[in-house]
Amino acid sequence: MPSLEPKGEGERAPTTGSGRGSLRHLARRLLDARRERTAGRDLERRLRQELQDLDIQPPLSVTELCQALSKKRGRPIILQAHPLPVSGPSGLWLETDKADLVLYQKDTSPLHQDHIILHEVMGHIRGDHRPTPDGPEWEVAVPGLGPDAVRRVMARCDYDDGQECEAENAATIIMAWSWMTAGDAPQRQSDPALRRVHRAIGDKRGWL
C-alpha cells in the first residue's frame, strides 16, 4: 500500500508512464511549433529577397510580377483563366518544354484569382516544386494538350501536402504584404542604389 505521508521538502513524486508520455507529446508539439515558426520566417525572407530582386514595387500587380519572374527565368509564364471543375483544383501549373502554363479558376473573384496565381507562380514555380505521384488528372481541364507535351504538373487542391502548404503560405504572405502597402507606397527612386539605401534606413512595409 503506498504511503499517504506528504513528501518532504525538495522531494518529487515519481513520473508515471502516462505522465512521461504527456511530456513527450508536449515536447514534440513545442518542437513542431518552433520548426513552423522558423520555416515561416525563412519563407518570408526568401520571398522578400525575390520580390526585391525582381524590383517589384507597390501597388502589387500580379501580372507584372509574373512577367518579371518570366524574364528572370528565361521562360514565358502564360496565365489563362479557365472554367475548372468546382470539385477539382482551383489552379494548375503545367510545365512544357517551352513555357509554363498557369490555369486559374475563371468563375471566381479577381482577388481569389490573384491568390491562385501567386500560389502557382510564387509558390510552385519559384520553389521548383515536384508533383506527388498520385496527383489529380489534368487532361479533363486541358483537353487537346497531349501528355507527352507536359513535363510537370502541380495542382492546387491538397493543403496537407508540404509543397502545397508552402505554396499557399507564399501566396498568403504576398497578398498580406500587398494590403499593407496599398495606398501607402513610398516614392519610387529611379536609382537602384538609392532604393537600397531607402530599404536599409526606411520603415519596413511588406517586402520593401
Image (cartoon, rainbow, N blue to C red):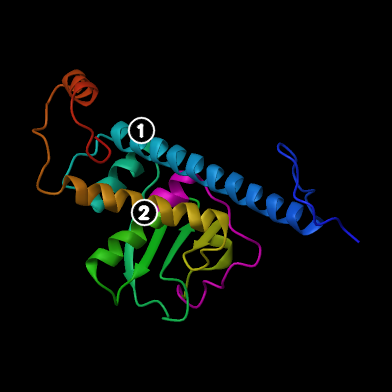
From this viewpoint, is residue 169 visible?
yes
Whether residue 132 appears in magenta in the rendering, the answer is yes
Label 2 SS: helix
What's the residue at 59%, 67% (across, down)? 135
| Residue under label 2 | 171
Residue 84 position within the rendered picture, expressed as x and y whole percent measured from the top left: 40, 76
Q: CA distance from mark 1 to mark 2?
A: 15 Å
Whether residue 12 appears in magenta in the rendering, the answer is no
Q: Above or below — where is 97 with respect to 200?
A: below
Q: What is the quadrant of residue 90 in the picture?
A: bottom left
Assign the C terminus to one quadrant of the image: top left
Say few, some or many: other residues with alpha carbon within 10 Å of mark 2 (under 14 / 14 to 19 / 20 or more): many
What's the residue at 71%, 36% (across, down)? 10
Assign the N terminus to one quadrant of the image: bottom right
Q: Tell me where the magenta segment starts and ends, as one range.
A: 121-142
Label 1 SS: helix
Q: Nearer the viewer, residue 76 or 50?
A: 50
Query: Is residue 198 shown left or right of residue 75?
Result: left
Q: Nearer the viewer, residue 125 or 6?
A: 6
Counting residues from the start of the chain, the first of labels 1 and 2 encountered is 1
Q: As shown in the figure, which amino acid type bears the numbered disc 1?
A: Gln
From this viewpoint, is residue 100 visible?
no
Residue 161 position within the rendered picture, expressed as x and y whole percent measured from the top left: 57, 60
Task: Name, please, the residue furthest toward the right.
Answer: 1
Q: As shown in the figure, which amino acid type bears the numbered disc 2?
A: Ala
Query: Is residue 123 shown left or right of residue 29?
Result: left
Query: Is residue 16 shown left or right of residue 191?
Result: right
- The numbered mark at residue 40 is none
| Residue under label 1 | 49
Q: What secondary structure prevails in the magenta region?
A: loop
What's the residue at 8%, 33% (across, down)? 187
